[in-house]
Structures are given as C-alpha cells and as structure tokens.
C-alpha cells in the first residue's frame, strides 16, 4: 500500500473540486451567509474553529500529502504562533500595529525553526524527521510549561485582542478571507515548479535525485511553507480564543492535524476541511452522547480505529475515495 | 561526593529503563525498517499491567511476568493485524503505528481512568543502604542490575545464537537471508514481539521508581528512546546501550542543577550528535 | 531436466524485463547463460529464486512448480543463489556466514562444510574474520561456499568473475570444476573464456527472450553466433585461455 503516493499529482484531474470549480465556491458562499442565517454565538465559534484547524491541517498536508514526510511536532509551529502573538500583545498594546509585528515575528520564528529541524533530521533519514520534530515540540512545550514568569505555566494566560477583532462576525469574515488567501497560496505553491518537484520526490525520491534536484533543499522549502502556514493558523487560533495554555503545543494537537489530514484525504488540501469538520464536531457533540453509551466518552478510540482502517484500506481518505482516485496497491513484498 | 554518587545511580537507573525501551525500538527499526510509534504505548501497557497485578497479588515477580506478557501479546496482535500488511512502506508504518498508539492509549484510559494510579516499591526492594554519607536506594540498584542482565542476555543472544546471527544478517541484507532458506517474516514477528516485551518490562520497572503510572508516561519515554537511538545510531544494540546511559546520566545531572532543563539537555545533545555524526555514535553509514 | 522454464515473463516496476524465457537445465551439468548487458540474465536467476516473481509462464524445479513461492521456500527446495554483488554479510564472520546457510546442524551439513573449506582453502584460514574484511575474490568464494553448505541441488551463480584478478578467475574455474561433480550449476557469465572453460551447455538471452541454446562445443565452433549475440569482436580460437 502506498499511502501518500496513491493520488495523482495535484488536483488538476477533476476540475469540479478545484477553486475555480463550483463546489468550493458554493461552500464559500454558504459559509459567508452563515452569520446572516444563524448568527448564534456557538455556531460561529465552532465554524471559525473548524476553518482555523482546517488551515492547520492543510499545512500538515503539504508535508504528508505533497512531500511524503511525517511530522510529530507540527503543533510546535501552531503553538509558537499562538504564544508569540499572545505574549507580544499582552506585553504591549492590543493594536493592529503590534499584531502585525507579532505576525512578522511568528513568521521569522517558524522559518528559522523549520530550517533548523529540517536540516538536522532530513539529511539523515526521513523517519528521523518524525522523531526529531517530536523531541523539539516537547522541548518548546516544556519551555511553555516551566517558564512561568513569562507564560504563566500550565494555567496559561488571557490577553486582549485589538478592538476591531473582538466582534465575532467581523472576525469570522476575517478568518474566511484568511482561509481563501491561504488556499490560493497553497494551490499556487503545489502547482508551481517547486511543488511539482516535491510531488516528484514523494513519488520517487531516488529518481528526483538522479534528475539532479537537490532533494534536501526542496524538502526544506516544504517544511518552511508548512511551518509558516501552521504558525499563522496558531495566530488565528489565539486571536479567537483570547487565551493560551500549553495545550496548543502538545503532541495531541499534532495528532489532530494528522487525523484530520488522513481522514479527510492526503494530498488533496480540501480534505483538511472534511477532517477538521468531523473532528471538531465529534469533540463538540460525542462526549454528550456518553450518557447513552460510555463508548462515546472515549470517542478517540473510534477515531483511532477509523484512522487505522483508512490508512490500511482507503489511503485516499474520504475525499480521495469519494473522488474515485485509482488506488494502486503496491505489492506487499516490495521493499 | 554523596550527591554525585546518588545522581549517577539515579541516572544509570533511569538510563537502564530507557534502554529497555530503546533497544527494542532500535532492533525493530534496524531489522524491519519499522519505526514503531506505539512503542511507548507498549511500555505503558507493561506499566499498567504490572501495577494492576502487583496491587492484587503483591508479587513483583508476577507483575514483571504479567507486564512482559501483556507487551508481548499486544505486540503480537499489532504485528499480525497492521504492520505485517505494510512492510516496506515507511510512511504508512509511521502512520499506522501512530493509530495503534492512539487506540492503545485510549483503551488504557478507558479501563483505568485518566488519573494517575499510585504504586509502591515491593517491600523486599524498598529502603536504602547507607555507606557513611552515601545513601544508596535499593530499588535503583535493582533496576540497574536487571537492565544490565537484560543487556548481557540480549548481547549474548545476538552474538552467539543462530537467531542472533539471522537478526544481524537481516539488518544488513534481508534478501540474502531469505535466499539462504530462512523465512525472515517469522524472524520479524519474533523480534517485534520480543522488543514489545522489553518495552513493557521497562514500564513495569519504571512504575515503582516514579511511584505511579499516568497516561503521559508512554509518549514521554518513547521520546527519550527516540533520542537514545538517534544518539546511539539506529539498529545498533551497543549504540542503544551507550545512548541510554548518556541520556540517563545527562538527565540526572542536569536535574540536580536545573530540574526544568533535564529534557532540554538531551534534546541539545541529540541535535549536536545529528550535526556532527548524523548516523549516530554507532550508526551504520548511508542508508 | 532438473530445471525447466517455459515462456517466463517478468516485470520489474513497469518494465517488461523478461518477455519470453524458455530454457532447460539438465541435471549434473554446467549451463552458462550468456547475453549482452541488460539482456535479462540476472533477472532470469532472480525469477527462478522468487526474488523477482515471474508474472507469466512456468518455472519447474525437479518436476514441481516454483511459481509464486517466496525466496526462502525456493531455497529450501534446494536452490542456492550467489548474487552478482556476492552479498557476503560484512558484520558476520566467515564462519557465521557459512553457518547461517546450514539449516540443520547434522553430519551431512558438516561434511558439506568440510568440502567447502577443502575447495576454498583461503576461507579455512579466515574463519574468524569478518566478511567485510575479505578481498573481492575471497568474498566470491565465501558466497559460493555458503550456497554449497546450504545443500543446493542447483546452484545459480551470477557473474562470479566480475572484477576479479586473472589469477582469482583461474582459482574460481578450478573450484567450479570440482563443484560440478556434486551439483548442477547455472552460471551467468560475461567472461567467455571462463564460460567456455567450465560450461557444458549454453543459453543465449537477448532483450528478454531466449534466442539460442545447445552444447557449449557447438557455440565455440560458431563464430557467427558469438559475434551476433555476445559482441565478441574477434572470438579467440577455442577460448581456452583459462
């Protein structure tokens, strides 16, 4: 079974699910109408969360689905984005100017860290990336937990956001704009020559190397793009929650990204929305069903099993399978 | 002086328990090319099984056996149902073992609840010996002895027995092992089950050392094991042994001066090794 | 016939490497597979062994089908394989390399081990050395010896003379002559001198097809055939240089 290798390159095959196609447009229109149709606080908050987590998952898909490497420390970027914006605004003024400064700082941090981790691990073996990202994420998590004078430790801290962003509906539309811009950027990226090389590396690294591509360089670019987008998602998350605790950097957050990407469909970008929607809804509503049957209290088991089944039998995830991509199964003997 | 001896003992003790986790992880990776992200869960299953049995029988021997049996069984089922299907696909292996980790961890917390469960050191091993100013905790000595014995046993198995020869040959060239009439898949299963049991043994021994089991101990020790194999070199038994001692000692010494930084030191150590000797201290070069 | 391939076809990835291989190997003789680089000689051996499973045709060994068998099962039926790169285990000692191939530690096994050390005296002196420390020629001897210890009724040897000094090739030819009294040998060989010195039958493979087979003595006489498929510009008379 070839997990991320199973989909044909990019999305150009089926126009109907591309940005220019009608499904995303209709979805966007629907989302834009939500505040008018059902302006309840809970709905808007949940939708905002789903969209932000989808951006996070899309950034993960760049690594897993388009480059074929697994990260266990992606929460590091998400969390550092959240912490940086929270800390900077808390220690200055909640103005748009400082927010912009925080975003710039976040970008810089994400670039430096992603290159550092990528350089250390990817030049050895891709599996090292999985282990080393985990270690680094844990490292920063411990800083967040133990550096109490700055981060207030496990209790976390809250902060005020610029007045303009305090309005739920305004923020909702801002997030919608954010996701559209990110989508356009990421689609551009994967259809660019660089993105093509990444897909070539995913398909056959040896061949890409043979063709003269500096594989390490392209993988580093991929981790940088993924890191930057993830940290922006973290910024958006912090601004919505207006509260930050070490949970944003825990390995569970990375696992969430992994689950969302796999369940939605790797190498599809849009799958992230399906994955994020499912997970967020499950987290919101399944625990309530625990009174009916205790298994719902442990809904993570269900997701874990679903995830295992998808990895084993539907490597295209929900979206990939729905699109009917051919799933070539590599011979089990192949090594 | 007494502080130094105690820190060294405690570092060695922790190192030995990490070694049990890391050596299995490294062997499995070296032979099968499988990076098992559920390895820490097997450790945790061992810990919980051990605590559960110890609370009921008050026999630490039974706890050790039960923990290893639990690890071996879960490992066996896991290899059959998932890993066997995806040999050769590194990404899918990482993904699938992560899924197994989620399920295994959640099964534990569904059974035992999310809170920590306290446990004690068995009476025979409780307390300490005093040599002047130096106080030696008995249980630490016990873990060091057990870890050392296991290391010797595994070393003997790898270097002297036929299975050991097959494993070492398999790490180098699986195809050729097959061509000599050996069903390497059977050896894979055996090594996987064995590595799982070792991880679980580490878990059983760790629980009394820290006085409790909790749902975070799996991933925590798995990460230390990762650091160990990165430092020591994937697939190298000697590397795991040395790496574990380094990680254990570095953690213990830093913990004395600056408790918060003990993990940080190991991450920095790992980064340094990666920078200077990317394949680890004892790693085989290249792929 | 101890080994018979009929219309064997093998894909590697999307490449159709073997398209139509049919050949027969009589017991107790040395059959040499000849052909240009990339003709499919190595893949033929790998398909017999199950390392590159055949997608079509039949492979039968001692009257039983080998199709679909994993490599270890083919080996247990009594086929030994010496790959082109020898694949000696560098981390194991010479003795461990040999012992690994001995599936049962019985008297017959020990006798075979003695036979191997007899025909390769170089190995006998280096039993405790690591495989990685051997010279190219010694590795080749170890690889062949390993296959012999394994009680092979059929020995598949891929280009043993490759990269060896002439004196080593000579030793090898001597050893092969001793081996062929004990077991059937299929030899892939580019060195026509060695091939004609030890071979009794030949098979020529070109572009994934078997194009010609017969007695080695006929091939030695037919310079046209040599020129056409083997690229031997000026085939030396008789080729008996070894």
Image (cartoon, coloured by chain):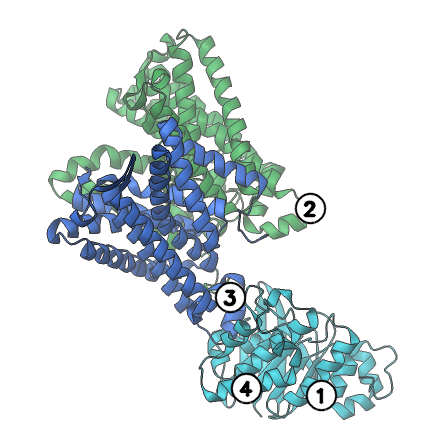
- Residue at mark 4: C112
Q: Residue A105 in the image: x percent, y percent? A: 50, 18
- Residue at mark 1: C199
Residue B169 is labelled as: 3
Kindly identify which chain the residue marked by label 4 belongs to.
C
Foreground label between 4 and 3: 4
Contact? badges 4 and 1 (CB < 8 Å): no
Q: Residue at x 57, y 71 (%)?
A: C128
| Figure chain in blue | B
Label 4 Cα crowd, 10 Å radius (few <14 / some 14-19 / many 20+): some
Kindly identify which chain the residue marked by label 2 belongs to.
A
Kindly identify which chain the residue marked by label 3 belongs to.
B
Q: Which callout, 4 or 1, points at the residue further toward the start of the chain?
A: 4
Residue C42 image-quadrant placement: bottom right
Label 1 Cα crowd, 10 Å radius (few <14 / some 14-19 / many 20+): many
Q: Secondary structure at mark 1?
A: loop
| Figure chain in cyan | C
Labels 4 and 3 within one chain: no
Q: Residue at x 67, y 73 (%)?
A: C138
Q: Residue at x 47, y 18 (%)?
A: A103
- Residue at mark 2: A212
């Amino acid at each position: 079974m070839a997990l991320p290798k199973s989909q044909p390159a990019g999305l150009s095959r089926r126009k109907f699910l591309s940005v220019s196609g009608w499904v995303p447009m209709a979805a966007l229109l629907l989302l834009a109408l939500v505040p008018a149709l059902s302006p309840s606080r809970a709905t808007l908050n949940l939708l905002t969360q789903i969209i932000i987590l989808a951006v996070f998952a899309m950034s993960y898909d760049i690594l897993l689905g388009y480059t074929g490497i697994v990260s266990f420390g992606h929460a590091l970027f998400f969390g550092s984005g959240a912490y940086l914006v929270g800390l900077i605004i808390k220690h200055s003024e909640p103005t748009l100017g400082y927010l912009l400064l925080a975003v710039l700082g976040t970008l810089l941090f994400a670039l430096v860290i992603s290159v550092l981790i990528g350089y250390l691990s990817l030049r050895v073996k891709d599996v090292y990336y999985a282990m080393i990202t985990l270690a680094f994420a844990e490292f920063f998590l411990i800083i967040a937990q133990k550096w109490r004078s700055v981060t207030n430790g496990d209790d976390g801290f809250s902060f005020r956001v610029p007045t303009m962003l305090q309005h739920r509906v305004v923020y909702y539309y801002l997030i919608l704009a954010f996701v559209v811009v990110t989508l356009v950027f990421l689609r551009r990226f994967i259809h660019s020559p660089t993105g093509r090389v990444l897909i070539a590396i995913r398909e056959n690294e040896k061949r890409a190397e043979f063709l003269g591509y500096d594989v390490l360089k392209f993988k580093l670019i991929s981790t940088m793009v993924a890191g930057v987008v993830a940290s922006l998602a973290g910024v958006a998350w912090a601004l919505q929650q207006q509260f930050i605790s070490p949970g944003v950097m825990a390995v569970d957050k990375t696992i969430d990204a992994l689950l969302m990407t796999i369940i939605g469909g790797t190498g599809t970008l849009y799958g992230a929305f399906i994955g994020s929607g499912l997970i967020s809804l499950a987290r919101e509503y399944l625990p309530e069903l625990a009174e009916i049957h205790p298994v719902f209290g442990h809904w993570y088991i269900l997701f874990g099993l679903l995830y295992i089944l998808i990895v084993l039998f539907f490597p295209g995830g929900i979206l990939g399978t729905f699109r009917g991509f051919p799933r070539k199964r590599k011979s089990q003997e192949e090594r | 002086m007494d502080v130094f001896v105690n820190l060294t003992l405690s570092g060695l003790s922790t190192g030995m328990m990490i070694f049990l986790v890391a050596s299995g992880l490294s062997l499995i990776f070296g032979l099968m090319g499988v990076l098992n992200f559920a390895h820490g869960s097997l450790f945790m299953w061992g810990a919980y099984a051990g605590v559960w049995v110890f609370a009921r029988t008050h026999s630490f021997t039974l706890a050790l056996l039960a923990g290893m049996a639990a690890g071996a069984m879960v490992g066996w089922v896991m290899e059959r149902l998932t890993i066997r299907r995806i040999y050769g696909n590194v990404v899918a292996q990482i993904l699938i073992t992560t899924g197994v980790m989620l399920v295994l961890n959640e099964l534990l917390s569904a059974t035992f609840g999310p809170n920590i469960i306290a446990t004690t050191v068995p009476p025979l091993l409780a307390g300490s010996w005093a040599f002047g100013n130096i106080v030696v905790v008995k249980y630490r000595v016990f873990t060091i002895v057990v870890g050392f014995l296991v290391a010797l046993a595994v070393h003997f198995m790898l270097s002297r027995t036929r299975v050991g020869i097959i494993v070492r040959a398999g790490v180098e060239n699986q195809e050729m092992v097959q061509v000599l009439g050996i069903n390497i898949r059977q050896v894979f299963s055996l090594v996987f089950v064995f590595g799982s049991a070792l991880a679980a043994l580490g878990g059983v021994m760790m629980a009394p050392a820290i006085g409790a089991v909790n749902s975070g101990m799996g991933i925590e020790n798995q990460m230390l094991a990762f650091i160990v194999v990165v430092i020591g070199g994937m697939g190298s038994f000697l590397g795991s042994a040395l790496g574990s001692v380094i990680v254990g000692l570095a953690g213990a010494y830093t913990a004395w001066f600056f408790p918060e930084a003990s993990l940080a030191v190991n991450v920095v150590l790992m980064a340094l090794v990666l920078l200077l000797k990317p394949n680890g201290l004892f790693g085989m070069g290249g792929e | 016939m101890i080994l018979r391939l009929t219309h064997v076809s093998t894909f590697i990835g999307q490449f159709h490497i073997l398209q139509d291989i049919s050949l027969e190997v009589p017991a107790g003789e040395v059959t040499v597979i000849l052909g240009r680089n990339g003709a499919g000689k190595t893949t033929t051996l790998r398909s017999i062994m199950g390392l590159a499973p055949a997608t079509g045709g039949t492979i039968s060994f001692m009257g039983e089908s080998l199709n679909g068998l994993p490599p270890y099962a083919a080996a247990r039926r009594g086929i030994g394989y010496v790959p082109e790169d020898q694949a000696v285990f560098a981390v194991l000692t010479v003795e461990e390399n040999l012992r690994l191939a001995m599936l049962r530690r019985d008297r017959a096994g020990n006798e075979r081990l003695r036979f191997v050390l007899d025909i390769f005296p170089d190995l006998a002196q280096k039993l405790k050395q690591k495989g990685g420390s051997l010279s190219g020629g010694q590795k080749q001897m170890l690889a062949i010896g390993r296959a012999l210890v394994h009680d092979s009724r059929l020995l598949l040897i891929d280009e043993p003379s490759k990269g060896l000094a002439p004196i080593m090739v000579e030793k090898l030819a001597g050893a092969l002559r001793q081996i062929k009294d004990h077991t059937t040998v299929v030899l892939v060989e580019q060195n026509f001198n060695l091939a004609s010195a030890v071979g009794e039958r030949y098979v020529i493979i070109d572009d994934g097809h078997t194009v010609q087979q017969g007695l080695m003595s006929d091939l030695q006489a037919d310079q046209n055939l040599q020129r056409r498929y083997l690229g031997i510009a000026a085939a030396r008379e008789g080729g008996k240089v070894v």
